[in-house]
Image: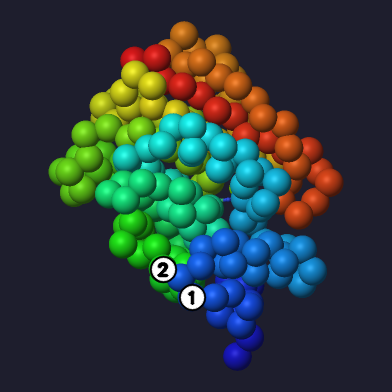
Amino acid sequence: TQSTRPQRLLGAVQKNATRGQPHSVLKAIDQFCTHTEWAMNVGDEKGCILDSVVSEVNPATVLELGTYCGYSTVRIASLLPPHAKLITLEFNPDFAAIARQVIAWAGLEDKVQLVEGASGDWIPKMKEQFGITTFDFVFLDHWKDRYLPDTKLMEECGLLRKGTVLLADNVICPGTPDYLEYIRNSPRYKSQYFKSHLEYTKVEDGLEKSVFQG
Ligand SMILES: Nc1ncnc2c1ncn2CCOCCNC(=O)c1cc(-c2ccc(F)cc2)cc(O)c1O
Ligand SMILES: [Mg+2]
């Protein structure tokens, strides 16, 4: 039977990366996606911007919306302080199964809780299910038409505090126009655009960093 792209990506990690070394996992995925097969990981160019924002925030609690194969999960978790927790939501069970193995190969399973399901269903349950009061950092990388409703949902559920940083991938390609319009015009956020490129291509894309003002 035919393998899937995530299965082939996991194979490249198991073949070329060293267990317990997150940077080697990222390098193996980036090489696979550059030379063999494109995949929708945040990639190394936008990944460096992600790294700098995560390092600046130094978050104790992180929410990632959209795990895919776990590339950005590994990238973020490798920068977290010892007792920090990263909750990542993935809708597609096949993607989640691959991501669990990629995260384990990097040796980061103790910092990561991968939850299978839709963001809209899980965001309202975060406090009761995981004992979260508020998130310090949120990485939005799931369905592009869910960025806005889920941001409003996080506000309503009291999951954001003064200073919480939202970082949104793909605000140009594929694009999240309604989210950008809202977040850039809302007095409740201070936003900044980081111009970059769509992973592994020369197409323009970028990340939008938004700080919740409370
Ligand atoms: N927990 C949850 N709740 C709801 N929905 C959820 C979920 N978990 C997952 N999903 C479903 C969506 O997951 C994948 C979302 N990501 C993308 O679609 C994406 C696409 C491109 C792209 C593709 C083709 C091009 F030509 C150009 C660009 C690039 C990217 O960087 C992307 O991130
Ligand atoms: Mg993305």
The image quadrant where one finds the N terminus is bottom right
- Residue in view at x 83 percent, y 46 percent: 202
Residue 129, x across and y down, in percent: 18, 49
Q: In this view, does 183 lie above or below 25?
A: above
Compare marks 2 and 1 and give the one earlier in the sequence: 1
For residue 182, side relative to residue 193 (left or right): left
- Residue in view at x 31 percent, y 62 percent: 110
Residue 169, x across and y down, in percent: 59, 40
- Residue in view at x 44 percent, y 32 percent: 57
Q: Can residue 164 be seen in this view?
A: yes
Which residue matches tag 2?
107
- Secondary element under disc 2, as helix, strand or loop, is loop
Q: Is residue 93 visible?
A: no
- Residue in view at x 48 percent, y 75 percent: 19
Residue 22, x across and y down, in percent: 51, 63
- Secondary element under disc 1, as helix, strand or loop, is loop
Amino acid type of the residue that numbered disc 1 sits on in the rendered structure: Arg
Amino acid type of the residue that numbered disc 2 sits on in the rendered structure: Gly
Q: Is residue 42 above or below residue 212?
A: below
Q: Marks 2 and 1: CB-CB under 8 Å?
A: yes
